[in-house]
Image (cartoon, helix red, strand yellow):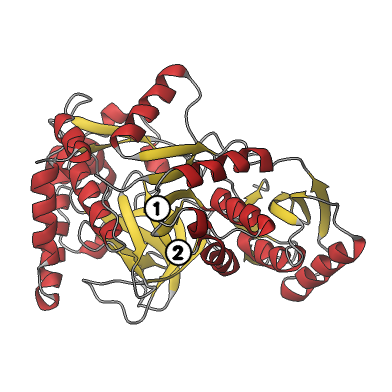
Amino acid sequence: MISIFNLSLQINGFPIKGAVADFEKIQSIPEEAFENYVIEKRKDIVDFHLKNNKSYLDFVGKPEVKNWDDLPIMTKKDFQKPLGERLSKGYTTKNAYFNKTSGSSGDPFVFAKDRYCHALTWATIFNRFSWFGIDFNSSLQARFYGIPLDFIGNTKERVKDFLSHRYRFPIFDLSDAFLETVLVQFQIKKFDYINGYTSSIVLFAKFLQKKNIILTSICPSLKCCVVTSEMLFEEDKILMEKQFGVPIINEYGASELDLIAFQNSDNEWQVNSETLFVEILDEENNVLPYGKEGRIVITSLYNKAHPFVRYDIGDIGILDEKSTLKKPILKKLIGRTNDIALLPSGKKAAGLTFYYITKSIIEDDGNVKEFVIKQTKIDTFEVEYVSEVVLTNSQIQNIEKAITTYLESGLNFTFIRKEKLERSKSGKLKQFVSLVK
């Protein structure tokens, strides 16, 4: 008997049964034949869009490209035009899946996937979560996400939650009083897993630490916790593993593409090679060897409705030296290309450098719950933080000293204590923001 989640996908026109069967066939391709599979699928999707997508043909500039490396790199800015102009021939709002990106990179846009491609996305998700004993048709999810506040948007999400076996904890209020109500639900319900934005789940772990509670002691059905959409720091992972009593799994995805990488049982960040082709490029668009840091560029091998061919997602990362075409491993995700701080000396630094340095110092005593860093001028930064007591002069001096050691001297910092931090409409917390153009 088909289950309720799969049934809801079928009813909405997404051929999930066939997609799951095809996904399993892709996985059965042996390593030695996988290069041919990738080359064939890359050629198929490029040929399709050059023949059926005027926008992509105009972008490439010619109807045929023989060498993969000669294809131009797409960015989010290339999608800043009406969706109707970007759709492939034969696809409309009535026969494709539509959604929009969160805009966390500063360039939000509406995108489309053909229904088979979207079903394959779900097949990928089903497969990865099954590694940890999670079945979307039966496992109960504790969901730490935002939710639309308008009636129609809110109702739609609640219906989706019901069909997907999800109980949602909206994350716009993460006060201790709210987290007390969350704790009560874990005592009542048999949750199988936690899923949601990293920063909000870290706050829940800190709340449990303060109360000296291990979550599995009150919710023994819990199997794992999957965090997504925001950076996962090693010390936060250790804290969550301790307070939840289950494995913490790191997910990396993009709504316009697919699930990109998912932590496997060997603690490797395994890249989705079944439906995506992932490259790491340098500033001149040359492909970098495994082990080298560069821009993450991704091709969706199955999306016929909308081209995502050699698409620069806006992130910087490294593929592990032990990667293969069939099993690429994401060694490190460094951050977004627009999260770079330009310093007075001309030096460029990943914004998360400030975050790492500051985090290691101000979180030692557990006083600071969370914080963000904003670059307001080339030499000026604001640190907004939520804490039980104000930071001491000694702590501030230690931070400034560490930043001078790791980066450069002459930088000015202002520390602003807040009741709560501003999150995006979706509920995400952006840890570093540069306002310097």
Give the number of callouts. 2
| Tag 1 residue | 193
Q: What type is the residue that disc 1 sits on?
A: Tyr
Q: Residue at x 62, y 42 (%)?
A: 180
Decide which of 171, 210 is in the foreground and name it.
Answer: 210
Quarter of the N terminus within the rendering: top left
2 or 1: tag closer to the N-terminus: 1
SS for callout 2: loop
Q: Nearer the viewer, residue 172 or 25?
A: 172
Taking 175 as reference, is 334 above or below it? Answer: below
Question: Mark 2: few, some, or many residues within 10 Å (few <14, many ≥20)?
Answer: some
Residue drawn where x is 48% and y is 59% of the image: 216
The amino acid marked with disc number 2 is Val
* Apparent side of residue 156 relative to residue 64 in the rendered image (left or right): right
From the top left corner, tell me how far across and down residue 324 is, in percent: 25, 76
Q: In the image shown, does 360 or 243 lie closer to the viewer?
A: 243
Question: Quarter-wise, where is residue 159 in the image?
Answer: top left
Q: Tell me residue 134's x, y (percent).
A: 29, 55
* Residue denoted by label 2: 246
Above or below: residue 55 compared with residue 367:
above
Secondary structure category for the residue under label 1:
strand
